[in-house]
Image: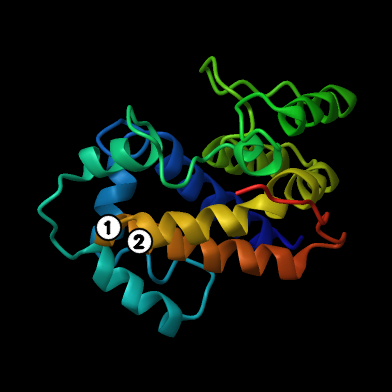
Amino acid sequence: MTDATRESFIFTARVLGALFYYPPESEPSAPLVAALRSREWLEQWPLPQEALIPLAEAFAQPCDEPLNEAWQRLLIGPWALPAPPWGSVWLDKESVLFGDSTLALRQWMRDSNIAFNSGQNEPEDHFGTLLLMAAWLVEQGKNDACDQLLAWHLLPWSGRFLAEFCDNAQHPFFMALGQLAQLTLAQWQEQLLIPVAQKTLFR
């Protein structure tokens, strides 16, 4: 990575990771929500402006459903989530949390001497957690490990997750967030030096 590419990757991974992982009114997410609802972010995001302008309009669009309630409906529950944000739900035959893919991720983290702690007692294969971990790895100068994380543990299932997330968002902000993640991860995949693992998806 060049310095500019490195900084862009860290920035986009941190923003997307925080918005999928933390509630919109939380300290990590609230300023990001405010920035996306303005046009402050357009020039900073490393994608063509013509692709981002429709998303900027969607981020700013009002909605009857409060943002926090939409985040709860889409990413927390208590009702069944239309697009669960954990990798093992998509990669495990039983569609369970803490499935074999989660255990494989944990083993890879141990083998790679990665001690990443989100501070929450939950599976490490949450979409937001993996994005935050990717940013952290690049900050630590572990670019090869970041490529492995993306190619083996995130990108094999994230496309299906994001497609389902966008289809079921029913809120302009989260539909735009899902589409922004789709565009950004597609760009990352183009820049990867290793092929993305082909894994069977069960949802």
Q: Residues within 10 Å of mark 2 (few under 14, many from 20)?
A: many
Q: Position of residue 33 (x, y in %)?
A: 29, 49
Q: Position of residue 35 (x, y in %)?
A: 29, 55
Q: Secondary structure at mark 2?
A: helix
Mark 1 touching mark 2, by CB under 8 A? Answer: yes
Q: Position of residue 65 (x, y in %)?
A: 15, 48
Residue farthest toward the front in the current orientation of the protein: 94
User: Camera-side residue: 5 or 94?
Assistant: 94
In the rendered structure, find residue 170 and report the number of the disc placed on it.
Answer: 1
Q: Amino acid at mark 1?
A: Gln
User: Camera-side residue: 196 or 13?
Assistant: 196
Q: Position of residue 133 (x, y in %)?
A: 64, 36
Q: Is 183 drawn above or below residue 27 in the view shown? A: below
Q: Residues within 10 Å of mark 1 (few under 14, many from 20)?
A: some
Residue 138, picture quadrant: top right
Residue pictured at 66% horizontal, 35% vertical: 88
Q: Secondary structure at mark 1?
A: loop
- Image side of residue 200 versus residue 120, left or right: right
User: Camera-side residue: 72 or 46?
Assistant: 72
In the rendered structure, find residue 175 and report the number of the disc placed on it.
Answer: 2
- Image side of residue 34 versus residue 128, left or right: left
Residue 23, picture quadrant: top left
Specify which label sits upstream in the sequence, 1 or 2: 1
Residue pictured at 47% horizontal, 57% vertical: 164
In this rendering, which labeled residue sits more in front, label 1 or label 2?
Answer: 1
Q: Amino acid at mark 2?
A: Met
Q: Which quadrant, please, contains the N terminus?
A: bottom right
Colouring rule applied to residues: rainbow
Residue pictured at 55% horizontal, 20% vertical: 122
- Image side of residue 201 versus residue 17, left or right: right
Mark pair 1, 2: CA separation: 7 Å
